[in-house]
Amino acid sequence: MGRIDDIANRYVADWAPLNPTGATYVGIDGYDDQLVDLSPNGFAAQAELTRRTLAELDVTEPDTESERIAKEAMQERLGLDLARYDAGETASEVNVIASGLHEIRSVFDLMPTEGEAAVANIAARLNRFAGALEGYKTTLRTSADAGHVSSQAQLIEVAKQCDIWTDPAGDNFFHGLVERLTADGALGAELRKGAAAATAATAQFGTFLREEMAPRGREKQAAGRERYQLASQYFLGARIDLDETYAWGFAELARLEAEMRTVAARIVGPGASVDDAVAALDADPARKIQGKDAFRDWMQALADKAIEELHGTHFDIPEQVRRIECCLAPTSDGAIYYTGPSEDFSRPGRMWWAVPQGITDFSTWREVTTVYHEGAPGHHLQVGQTAVRAELLNRWQRLLCWVSGHGEGWALYSERLMDDLGYLADPGDKLGMLDAQAFRAARVIVDIGMHLELEIPRDNPFGFHPGERWTPELGWEFLRAHCRVPDENLRFELNRYLGWPGQAPAYKVGERIWLQARDDAKARKGADFDLRVFHRDALNLGSIGLDPLKAALDRL
């Protein structure tokens, strides 16, 4: 490796002590007893490292094509990181899925729990939790003084999450964590003290959000075009025409719903509606699983089967990636997500399901495609293959570069690919995939529409409030009309879109760009195009912005 890779590897070494929480997420050893500094100085220190690294990259020429790709990827990512920090977005962001609070709460989910040293690390972090939140309070106050603050609605929703996480009758997260650990004597006492302190600090942070920050919060949740354009570019790694994409969202949703009606007729009979098919599938006991543990076991079996069958046929799956763990998250936020393996693969990639309170029945026809999205050939293959390629990718590329449009776009592309490969031949499973695709298309419409407060097209194919301008209330009405998602989950989804502008469309728009990249490769290579080779070459580039991805693929 050359000079660009040296800069990248040095960045990781300098970044880890500034963000020990992040180090745990990506599996860098040695920082599990510390928490990230969420004070203004902590955010500033990470931004200064980014500035220095960008300045060094600017004057360093790559020696090879692989270094050229690495430089372009790093300049794109770090440049947008810095732009968001300078715009006041990074330090002020509080929403129901992403904030400093969520970062330091969820890191406990990934920490080793076996052995005295591992338990001691958890105890140390629990006892540092209150201090981290005090620093974060200062950051949020300072950001608000400078005019950067999240919406009142998001601040209140996160305060509610604090209530649930600390409620003995709810998630009771910190005490529940300690109860699952084995420790006696002084270490046991430290654990219990830390759990009590972290619980109290989280409850107090909820009060802080509700009573001090919410009154200062923005009344309007819409981001506006300027903020949204930056957010969209950050999540996609590509600059898109927002108005064209908004219009495309309507056409894509209409196309998918037409295909769903065709599949519904296969399930129930001619003339059947999609809702008729959904009712028939939900009533089928062969497609129902009772209990969270049984559902996790079903996910595990399906994920393992996909890896076994895809390896050596449609993909070359590295040995380290042929293991995945399906887990139930210790919270009930309604999120489904993937976490990558540690750097040495001692911690495997994991698929997580944060099941909402009260949900005990699961319909498998809805979730087959989710397993492919989170497992193989989706996130698990993509992230795992990147982590393995030490001979091709520097440490920053393997560990720190993540782009939602690339990652979520690939995972959604993978769902469609599994249909092409025959894995969704069952019409119920096929309807589940199409429903998930339609859900993501609806998010394109609602996310862009609400944050830009656009007019709903007068000739929209659904006859939905033509000529009116989007509001959160219309967003909820549209999602309920077009998404077959339980209200508990859908409410969380809408809150997520309103608080995290630009992220939700990255799935469907990312898939669109992936499909275009594949079509471009077919056109360039003609009869020499090989789908398996295209997938291998594309994934070997690591997770990079979609504009750098297209540029790199054009040169292959």
Image (spheres, rainbow, N blue to C red):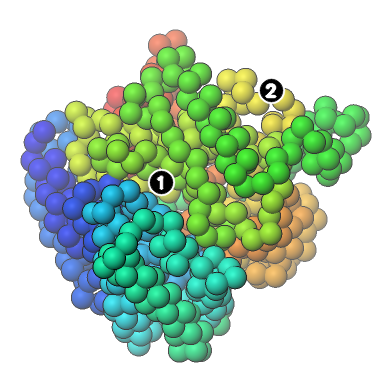
Between 376 and 104, the one lying in front of the other is 104
User: Which quadrant holds the N terminus?
Assistant: top left
In the rendered image, is residue 22 in sight? no
User: Residue 48's image quarter?
Assistant: bottom left
Reading the image, the residue beneath label 1 is 339
Is disc 1 surrounded by few (<14), some (14 to 19) or many (20+) residues within 10 Å? many
Q: CA distance from mark 1 to mark 2?
A: 29 Å
Q: Is residue 457 above or below residue 535?
A: below
- Taking the spot 81% from the left edge, 36% from the top edge, the residue there is 284
- Taking the spot 23% from the left edge, 64% from the top edge, the residue there is 34
Image position, residue 330 (x, y; %): 50, 57
Q: Is residue 434 above or below residue 238?
A: above
Closer to viewer: mark 1 or mark 2: 1
Q: Please, what is the three-letter code of the amino acid marked with disc 2?
A: Ala
Reading the image, the residue beneath label 2 is 425
Between 305 and 246, the one lying in front of the other is 305
Secondary structure beneath disc 1? strand
Secondary structure beneath disc 2? loop
Q: Give the total number of marks visible in the rendering.
A: 2
Between 535 and 29, the one lying in front of the other is 29
